[in-house]
Image (cartoon, rainbow, N blue to C red):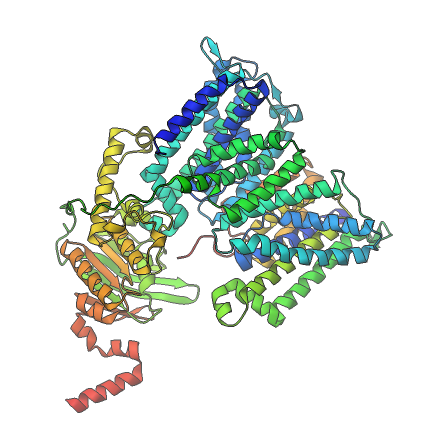
């Protein structure tokens, strides 16, 4: 079944529901299923797409419900619309308050903080009687209305809720297929690498957290107006756990899964006709069993059956567009990267110690040295993953020391990782696309509206990705999920991803590790081609023959200090270098040999 | 006042035990066990059943700890082991599911009414340094102190403790040095379940046992962990004592309705201004 046809079919099916002759009670359950669909979609946005968890979604749901209820209580049904917006706004702000301190920390802080937030909200709903009326709850919430039309029957409420769910699903699908969807997936799969690909990680995480909270709040507003009565027992941890189950059972990270899960779990008690304890027992066990045995959920299972074989590969790649003129615009022989007195301490260990390093524009500069000499640390410093303990780094004349990784990446300084950090669940093309930037980026609103600007941007991004993939020879693999590729091809994807940033300086951290000689030869050719296109290269590598063939200039580090710098020929005969690599005794031996021979 | 402080300290000890046992699993596996509160609850119910079957209190307590040890092993095999190589959220979700399962299973087995176990002591009050104290509170404080010392000796003065610490710090290296990683993790779960069970046994006589017992204790333990500094064992203990005292002082002097909300407020505040807690390590991921 095609991806286009399925939503249409579902919509048609949904349109039939009010005419199925369901009892009022069943119709009410269907409507509740729609409210929980919204709630599950909001949690999935966070959990499935961005890989962040919220254990306080019942709190957001409750804030939205109380906001709308207090606004419209005893008033006109027209107040539903401003209530919906206000509920989204208030819960979005609550999301900001929770997300801001916790999202920059490791994931478990968010889990505990949201759990605590949910508990605080539950206590507030129960005890802040002046506002929430405590256990009495709030009644007399009007049914939603348009001028001259009230959604006052179950069938009419169904229409309203179904349209809202369909709209949200459409937007989520667009988000999923857009650059934002890829960036979220990048954060989920490898947060550090997302940052070095130019993704502003904290801003995006906070944005999706607020969006998820706001959507949960809007679901709460719809719930309040649908039930016309709310009380605090609806907004406890039980509901959070229930929504979590809906997402997991339906399918984490799928568009339709949460809706499937929401309906399944809303109707399950009806079908089973058992007491609440038995029902909870089943869905608790179900939650645990699903995550162990079927992590993709029911929809994931269905989808894997529906999905046809991958489309045949295009044999003819599109013609190379060539890099834009501004690349390599820096005059040759000027300093592109300039490090002065760079120092980095880890506790008592000084990993980089007062290093001065200048990389000339247009050159291939190699950074070599024994293990632990500070090479990778320097790259981590220059790409903003570590803060400087001392000294300064400037790139193209602007200081970058202490700047955040995405700012540095966007300034034109890209890198690859020694221990591969690809976005494992994405395809090769999607990996590369994460790093692509278009000249005329479209904002979130345009992306959600699928405007002409957004479509033009996506086309430009794909062209840029194609170019980067061809330069590294991974174009034929573009539809493969990256974690299924062998190691050396993953390395090429890493470099292609860095190249897709269209950097002025590319820092490669041991690109040839694990490659056999013929693969390394190919790598040499490719790196030279990059240099010839005006990209400056800083290469960290242990493969000495490769370094000697490639490098215009070599800097040798030992114990975090520079011990030598020069052309490959100078380095080869430098006593300090031989000592650093082979030890003092060997150096004496070699000097003696040389004297004897001379 | 001494009475108030002693009761705060006693609850603090319970939070410390629960927090500490939670952190043991976290340090060894990086897993957050959201069913940990249910460990405490389960121990309470098992204790009740043992007493109900006619066992004397001390025997019932020992039997409970034994059961909890076995339970820890089974839990590790069923819930942790299949998910050991998956993202940390998988274990979080699975344990939330398991927690719901355990609570409702307990509801079906032991019923909805809160149950009462007798005190370990016949006396209702003892005099100490001129103050009248409840023997339960003193017992909790003393037992916790003994457990903490034993645990310190186990971790820092035995070969097993070295293996456990090595596995927690660097599982791959530990494995290369001949330490059986899976066995160490299994032992960690057994230890952790027994400590959580001990907290349940200690708290059962002063609380009523119902399915909410675990939830009430674990949330405070989480706050204790954050205040003390995530991942730090002394921090969890210190944090537990702080939360216990804070809670009782707020309840006495400010508001008993909002004591929990205030505790969570403190928790969010610590996260905001001082995410490392009192004794914690780095809070951001390293390269």
Query: Furthest-top residue in view?
Result: A148
Q: Is residue A441 placed above or below A399 in the rendered structure?
A: above
Question: Residue A49 lies in what quarter of the image?
Answer: top left
Residue at 30% in and 69% down: A561
Residue at 20% in and 51% down: A470
Can residue B284 be seen here? The reply is yes
Q: Which of these two is toward me, A199 or A451?
A: A451
Rendered-image quadrant of the C terminus of chain B? bottom left
> Does residue B219 appear to the left or right of B5 in the view shown?
left
Q: Which of these two is toward me, B147 or A425?
A: A425
Provide residue A5's location: percent of width, then percent of height.
35, 29
Question: Residue A592 lies in what quarter of the image?
Answer: bottom left
> Does residue B12 appear to the left or right of A370 in the view shown?
right
> Does residue B58 appear to the left or right of A174 in the view shown?
right
Question: Residue A539 lies in what quarter of the image?
Answer: bottom left
Provide residue B276's location: percent of width, then percent of height.
51, 52
Provide residue B5's location: percent of width, then percent of height.
73, 49
Provide residue A397's location: percent of width, then percent of height.
21, 52
Q: Which of these two is toward me, B286 or B138?
A: B286
Query: Furthest-right residue in view?
Result: B122
Q: Is residue A569 placed above or below A281 in the rendered structure?
A: below
Q: Is residue A587 placed above or below B228 in the rendered structure?
A: below
Numbered disc total: 0
Can residue A564 be seen here? The reply is no
Q: Which of these two is toward me, A328 or A6?
A: A6
């Amino acid at each position: 079944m095609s991806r286009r046809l399925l939503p249409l079919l579902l919509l048609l099916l949904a349109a039939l529901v009010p005419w199925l002759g369901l009892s009022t009670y069943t119709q009410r359950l269907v409507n509740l299923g729609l409210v929980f669909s919204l709630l599950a979609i909001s949690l999935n946005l966070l959990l499935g797409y961005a890989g962040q968890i919220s254990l306080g979604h019942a709190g957001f749901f409750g804030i939205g419900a109380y906001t709308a209820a207090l606004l419209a209580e005893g008033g006109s049904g027209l107040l539903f619309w401003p209530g919906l917006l206000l509920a989204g706004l208030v819960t979005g702000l609550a999301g900001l308050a929770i997300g801001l301190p916790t999202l920059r920390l490791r994931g478990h802080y968010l889990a505990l903080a949201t759990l605590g937030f949910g508990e605080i909200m539950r206590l507030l709903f129960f005890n802040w009687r002046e506002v929430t009326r405590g256990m009495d709850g709030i009644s007399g919430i009007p049914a939603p209305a348009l001028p001259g039309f009230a959604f006052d029957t179950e069938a009419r409420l169904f229409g309203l809720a179904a349209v809202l769910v369909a709209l949200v699903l459409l937007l989520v699908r667009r988000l999923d297929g857009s650059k934002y969807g890829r960036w979220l997936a990048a954060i989920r799969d490898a947060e550090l690498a997302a940052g070095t690909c130019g993704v502003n990680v904290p801003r995006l995480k906070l944005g999706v957290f607020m969006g998820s909270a706001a959507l949960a709040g809007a679901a709460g507003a719809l719930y309040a107006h649908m039930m016309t009565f709310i009380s605090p027992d609806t907004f406890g941890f039980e509901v959070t756990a229930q929504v979590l189950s809906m997402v997991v059972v339906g399918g984490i990270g799928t568009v339709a899964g949460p809706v499937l899960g929401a309906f399944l779990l809303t109707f399950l008690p009806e079908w089973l006709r058992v007491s609440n304890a038995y029902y909870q027992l089943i869905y608790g066990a179900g939650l645990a069993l699903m995550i162990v045995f079927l992590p993709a959920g029911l929809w994931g299972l269905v989808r894997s059956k529906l999905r046809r074989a991958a489309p045949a590969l295009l044999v003819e790649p599109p013609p190379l567009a060539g890099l834009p003129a501004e690349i390599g615009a820096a005059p040759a022989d000027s300093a592109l990267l300039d490090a002065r007195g760079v120092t980095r301490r880890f506790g008592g260990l000084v990993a980089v110690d007062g290093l001065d390093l200048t990389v000339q524009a247009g050159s291939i500069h190699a950074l070599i040295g024994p293990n632990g000499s500070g090479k990778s640390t320097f790259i981590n410093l220059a790409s903003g993953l570590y803060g400087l303990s001392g000294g300064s780094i400037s790139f193209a004349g602007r200081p970058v020391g202490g700047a955040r990784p995405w700012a540095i990446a966007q300034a034109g300084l890209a890198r690859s990782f020694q221990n591969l950090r690809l976005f494992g669940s994405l395809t090769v093309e999607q990996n590369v696309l994460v790093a692509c930037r278009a000249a005329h980026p479209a904002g979130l609103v345009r992306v959600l509206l699928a405007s002409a600007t957004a479509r033009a941007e996506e086309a430009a991004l794909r062209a840029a990705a194609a170019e980067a993939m061809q330069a590294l020879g991974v174009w034929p693999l573009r539809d493969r999920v990256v974690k299924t590729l062998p190691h050396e091809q993953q390395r090429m994807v890493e470099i292609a991803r860095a190249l897709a940033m269209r950097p002025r300086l590319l820092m490669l951290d041991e690109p040839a590790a694990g490659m056999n000689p013929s693969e390394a030869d190919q790598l040499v050719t490719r790196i030279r081609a990059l240099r010839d296109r005006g990209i400056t290269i800083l290469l960290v590598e242990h493969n000495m023959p490769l370094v000697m063939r490639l490098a215009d200039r070599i800097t040798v580090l030992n114990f975090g200090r520079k011990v030598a710098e020069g052309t490959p020929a100078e380095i080869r005969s430098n006593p300090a270098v031989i000592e650093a690599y082979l030890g003092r005794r060997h150096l004496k031996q070699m000097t003696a040999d040389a004297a004897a021979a001379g | 006042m001494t009475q108030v402080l002693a009761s705060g300290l006693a609850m603090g000890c319970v939070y410390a035990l629960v927090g500490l046992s939670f952190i043991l699993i976290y340090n060894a596996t990086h897993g957050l066990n959201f069913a940990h509160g249910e460990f405490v609850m389960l121990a309470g119910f098992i204790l009740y059943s043992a007493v109900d079957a006619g066992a004397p209190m001390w025997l019932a307590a020992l039997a409970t700890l034994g059961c909890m040890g076995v339970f820890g092993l089974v839990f590790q095999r069923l819930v942790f082991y299949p998910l050991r190589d998956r993202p940390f959220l998988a274990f979080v979700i699975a344990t939330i599911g398991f927690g719901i399962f355990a609570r409702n299973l307990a509801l079906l087995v032991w019923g909805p009414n809160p149950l009462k176990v007798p005190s370990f002591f016949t006396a209702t009050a003892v005099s100490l340094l001129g103050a009248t104290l409840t023997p339960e509170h003193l017992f909790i404080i003393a037992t916790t102190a003994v457990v903490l010392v034993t645990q310190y000796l186990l971790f820092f003065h035995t070969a097993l403790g070295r293996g456990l610490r090595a596995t927690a710090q660097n599982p791959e290296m530990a494995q290369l040095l001949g330490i059986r990683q899976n066995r160490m993790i299994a032992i960690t779960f057994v230890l952790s379940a027994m400590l959580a069970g001990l907290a349940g046994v200690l708290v059962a006589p002063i609380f009523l046992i119902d399915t909410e017992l675990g939830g009430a204790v674990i949330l405070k333990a989480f706050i204790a962990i954050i205040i003390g500094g995530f991942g730090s064992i002394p921090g969890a203990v210190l944090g537990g004592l702080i939360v216990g005292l804070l809670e009782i002082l707020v309840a006495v002097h400010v508001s008993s309705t909002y004591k929990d909300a205030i505790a969570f407020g403190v928790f969010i505040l610590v996260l905001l201004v001082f995410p490392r807690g009192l004794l914690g390590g780095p809070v951001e991921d390293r390269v």
